[in-house]
Image (cartoon, rainbow, N blue to C red):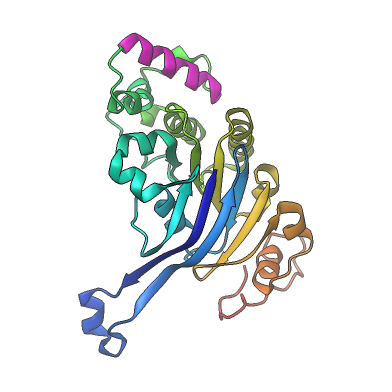
Amino acid sequence: MIDVRNLTKHYAASAGLRSLLPGRRGEVTRAVDGVSFRIGAGEVLGLVGESGSGKSTTGRLLVGLETPSAGTILIEGIDSAAARARDKKAFHRQVQMIFQDPYGALNPQHTVEELVGRPLFYQGVRDRVAIAKSVRAVLAEVGLNPADSYLDQHPHQLSGGQRQRVCIARAIILEPRFLVADEPVSMLDVSIKWDIVRLLKRLARQRGIAMLYITHDLATVGAVCDRLAIMHRGRIVETGPVEEVLSAPSDAYTRALIAAIPSADPDVVRGPLPGTTQAVV
């Protein structure tokens, strides 16, 4: 379904930074530095790493919110850059994203019915009855029941978990083939987090969606992911089945991330992440 080959994104230093640090002129930030992976239909690949490792930039490249410096993204064998240039609407019917912040991702002026149904309107659907029917069906699918009770509500009237379900409904109403979930549970309470994780897993299975699940939380990946890719400083340092990576990691950075999983033992000693002075906390 998804074939990413040598994906690269470099950012040149801004003029302001160059003026402050003249010795660093010409330097670039290698946010994503030669990343390659594949995701099959119905499969969830977890992209894991610390903040600043390049995970979210990778996701934004895949959905067309950033332009790669180099590399190729193939979706069902078709180059995504060529697909966007040819028909952007058709591309976004196939590729959608769930953002990290369910509070900032929803327009507070719109109702749930408008928020979820608007992608259909942008795609040219003008039958209001058909849109309303699709909105009700997808709200029920993501667990907002009864759907009619949510249609006229605004985002500020919803809980964090309900908002994230609205974001998921909006992302899947176009029946995409590929979904990027960028830390979709990081801002939710623990009691709600697992419901959203199970929902994402079920959607991937039932709809045959290829999903990239971006997170820094290794505690959730076993419940949703089939494979893991560990990202460090813009590169993937380890990949494999989720059970294999978590039980027998081969890379020192992966071992450090696993060691950072919270422990109830107050005597556990944390060391620095490999290649840094940053302590694992």
Residue 139 lies in magenta, yes or no?
yes
Residue 22 image position (x, y, % from top left):
25, 88
Answer above or below: position of 271 versus 122.
below
Image quadrant where one finds the C terminus: bottom right
Q: Quadrant of residue 70?
A: bottom left
107, above or below 260, in the image: above
Provide residue 3's location: percent of width, then percent of height. Answer: 53, 51
Magenta segment includes 62: no
Instruction: Give me the residue at 29% from left, 82% from top.
Output: 26
- Main SS type for the magenta part? helix
Could you tell me which quadrant the N terminus lies in?
top right
Closer to us: 63 or 159: 63
Q: Position of residue 125 (x, y in %)?
A: 31, 19
Over which residues does the magenta segment extend? 128-143
Report the residue at 26% width, 78% height from top.
17
Q: Residue furthest front?
A: 77
Q: Is residue 7 visible?
A: yes
